[in-house]
Image (cartoon, rainbow, N blue to C red):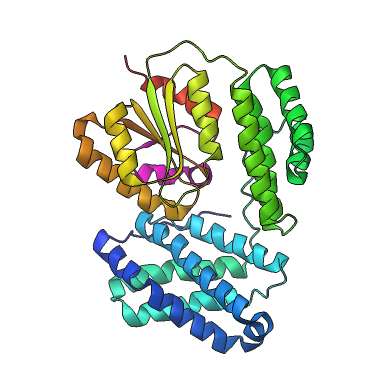
Amino acid sequence: MPAMTPVAPLDAEQLNAFAALREAAVAHALKASEAAHPEVFARFGARGRAACADDLAYHLDFLAPALESGQPDAFLHYLAWLAQVLRSRGVPTASLPDSLRHLDDFYRRTLPASIADTISQILTAGLAHLASDAEPPAYDHPGPAPWEETDPFRDAILKGERRTAQRCFDDALNRSATLIGSEVHVIQPALYGIGRAWQENRVTVAQEHLATAMSHSLMARAFGLVLPADDNGGRAIFACMTGNHHDLGLRMVSDAFEMDGWQTQFLGGNTPLPALLSQCTAYAPHVLCLSASLPQHLRMLKETLAALRRQLGDASPRVVVGGLVFNHFPALANTLDAQWLGPTAEDAAIGARQLLPR
């Protein structure tokens, strides 16, 4: 998909005006969609109505960072992804472009032209993108090259066959003699493939959760079997901000840092901002690594960076950002007071060497 021309981003006051109308926008678009497609709502009933409301809210979740950054590509990717998710589940997609028109109409009626025009530019681009039958985004590409153990490992974790999965991962670990290489080239592409299969309605949410949980436990077991490099003097904290529960990739990055000689503290997913700031004050890390999986996590990421600067000032650590949203849209990192060091844990650990205390 060719990149859309950037638009003028909204300022903080304009974004607040947009955010304040969230519930009203969803209610307006839901009512208009129900009137336009009564047969769809009759077919799926209350459950379908709730799902439609959720999808409208997701529209706004993805639209907000596009308005804030002026870079709409992630929003267009989301629309193509959602169209495939709906098609694969037998849900008619005609209501999807209609929902964008309903939102455009709502904001035209309720916001000043200085805000509504920018919203309309992105929503109109979304309509054109859907009409072009654009290929849905392949969030598993680009990705790390899979090793020969990846496919049997993926099949085993989907079935909950722990012994088989452990044997596959041990084979990779023994053959490569590198924990991080095995995580990046076996577990990461396996989970990317499972994510793609969920997108196409070929695996369930339960299977996806099972695969992730099993991967976490196998990584923890393997971590205890390898020796890290000597202490290099660096300290690092790893966290996902409030609202982001996807922490397995961040765990890989933390492992990669520790294998490279860093002292690390892994706080995991959904870390409350006050707790993160308190730990940064107590531990005084040289580097803080924060993960954003989806575009809607960027707002909280910006708030975290601002709070960090206010509280710690010149004593603030260097901030490294990563996660799926940056892997596919690296330019988004340029809108932050932070660095993106690459799409894999290996890349991040190598790039972080320049951030070591001298």
Front residue of 332 and 254:
254
State the image quarter where residue 79 is shown: bottom right
Report the magenta residues as a range: 324-342
Q: Residue 339 colored magenta?
A: yes
Q: Is residue 186 above or below residue 212?
A: above
Front residue of 290 and 228:
228
Residue at the image position 71 percent from the left and 33 percent from the top: 146
Q: Which quarter of the rendering shows the C terminus?
A: top left
Residue at the image position 34 percent from the left and 43 percent from the top: 336
State the image quarter where residue 154 is shown: top right
Q: Residue 298 colored magenta?
A: no
Q: Is residue 75 above or below residue 215?
A: below
Image position, residue 58 (x, y; %) = 50, 65
In this rendering, position of residue 345 left or right of residue 38: left
Image position, residue 195 (x, y; %) = 65, 49
Image position, residue 111 (x, y; %) = 31, 76
Q: Is residue 251 above or below residue 114?
A: above
Residue at the image position 50 percent from the left and 74 percent from the top: 100
State the image quarter where residue 215 is shown: top right
Residue at the image position 52 percent from the left and 34 percent from the top: 251
Q: Number of callouts in the render?
A: 0
Q: Which quarter of the rendering shows the N terminus?
A: bottom right
Kindly tell me whether residue 345 is visible in this rendering.
yes
